[in-house]
Image: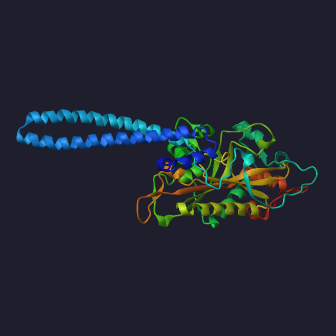
Amino acid sequence: MLQVSVLKEQTAAVLAGLAKRHYATAEADVQAILALDQRRKDLQTGHDQAQAEANELARQIGGLMKSGDKAGAETLKARTAELKQQTKAHTEELAEVEKELQQVLYKLPNLPHHSVPAGRSADDNEVVREVGQKPELPAGAKPHWDLIEQYDIIDFALGNKITGAGFPVYKGQGARLQRALINFFLDEARAAGYTEIQPPILVNEASGYGTGQLPDKEGQMYHATADDLYLIPTAEVPITNLYRDDIIAPAQLPIRNAGYTPCFRREAGSWGAHVRGLNRLHQFDKVEIVQITQPEHSYEALEGMVAHIEGLLQKLELPYRVLRLCGGDMGFTSALTYDLEVWSAAQQRWLEVSSASNFETYQANRLKLRYRPETGKPQLLHTLNGSALALPRIVAALLENNQTAEGIRLPAALHSYCGFDKIG
């Protein structure tokens, strides 16, 4: 959530940033926020003045009663009753104005970092670098949805039977590969200095608002309405919310956490090869890395997170590229996002497997997540997160890129984790 002080003091810069995001109602929403903030201040001033006058009259009434001037005391009591009604009205209206102000603030997306390229869609994203050689597959090479059927390692029909489309069942070597990847990613995160967290996979409404999934993405989350809880779309939500309403001592920073969770997303996309098989699911596994830092260190932290993710892809021997997302393609809460994509040789296309983002103070302002500098008032922290990594498309690329006549060769980094070096 953007800070009202930033909207007031840097209005032109805010409008320029929202324009880069192609946010259509930017000027009207910003003006509405500024007007509501001024109304809030006026009401607070009126409330405080009435309260101060009532306190002074109470002191005077006591003196009049002691001196025997009951008529004078009654006159002041009548005025005190009027002031009491005024403060009550101010309090009620102030609560309504603050609620309305909060709702309009929730509508505004984060401001993009100056390095974010202009553009409206994924076609306008900037390729930062491309690493690795794309494999040349033999004639008759198959996409992963045919390979998983050939080797009987993932069953979509069974998942559809027990739950519905987009909930696959992993079995045999497929299940072992899933577990191997999760353990590999967690071990690599721990070696890089991240503390492993095992969070809940259901969160309350406050947590959804804290990291920005609500009210922007409520339609994409599964909602357990009887208990008003949401299944998480990513471990970012519970792990970042561990620090909601906290003031962190500088000695504790940076906070670096990693966690494995299943992830749940209602959106399924359109039909076609681009969402076939493992390309898009309702439930999938992911290891997430999260950092909380002082503002001056957050972009260095983001580059370090991207380097960590690249290291995972290199150890998995997957060709990949790094993209800097344009203003029109970034997530609602992000100030700067890098996407990492792996090459799918059988599909002849790039598959997104990770996003690493710096949210600057946007989430921290919602979370009331601050640190206390050596001097002055508590300040908002910066939050960051990245997928390290999401499993489905990693599995798809591993299967497709490494298929041979003798089976599917696995990268050396996974041999000890799987207990086998090939599928088939």
User: For the point 53% across and 39% down, which residue is it?
Assistant: 29
Residue 103 visible? The answer is no
Residue 293 appears in which quarter of the rendering? bottom right
Relative depth, front residue between 338 and 416: 338
Coordinates of residue 58 in the picture (x, y in percent): 18, 41
Coordinates of residue 26 in the picture (x, y in percent): 57, 40
Above or below for 186 versus 144: below
Residue furthest right in the image? 139
Left or right: residue 384 versus residue 68 is right
Above or below for 269 versus 384: above
User: For the point 60% across and 61% down, which residue is it?
Assistant: 299
User: For the point 54% across and 50% down, which residue is it?
Assistant: 362
Residue furthest front in the image? 12
> Total of numbered circles in the picture?
0
Relative depth, front residue between 262 and 390: 390
Relative depth, front residue between 52 and 338: 52
Q: How is the image coloured?
A: rainbow
Relative depth, front residue between 100 and 344: 100
Q: Quadrant of the C terminus?
A: bottom right
Left or right: residue 404 versus residue 34 is right
Residue 71 appears in which quarter of the rendering? top left
Coordinates of residue 179 in the picture (x, y in percent): 70, 55
Above or below for 235 versus 186: above
Left or right: residue 120 versus residue 423 is left
Residue 198 visible? The answer is yes
Coordinates of residue 368 in the picture (x, y in percent): 47, 51
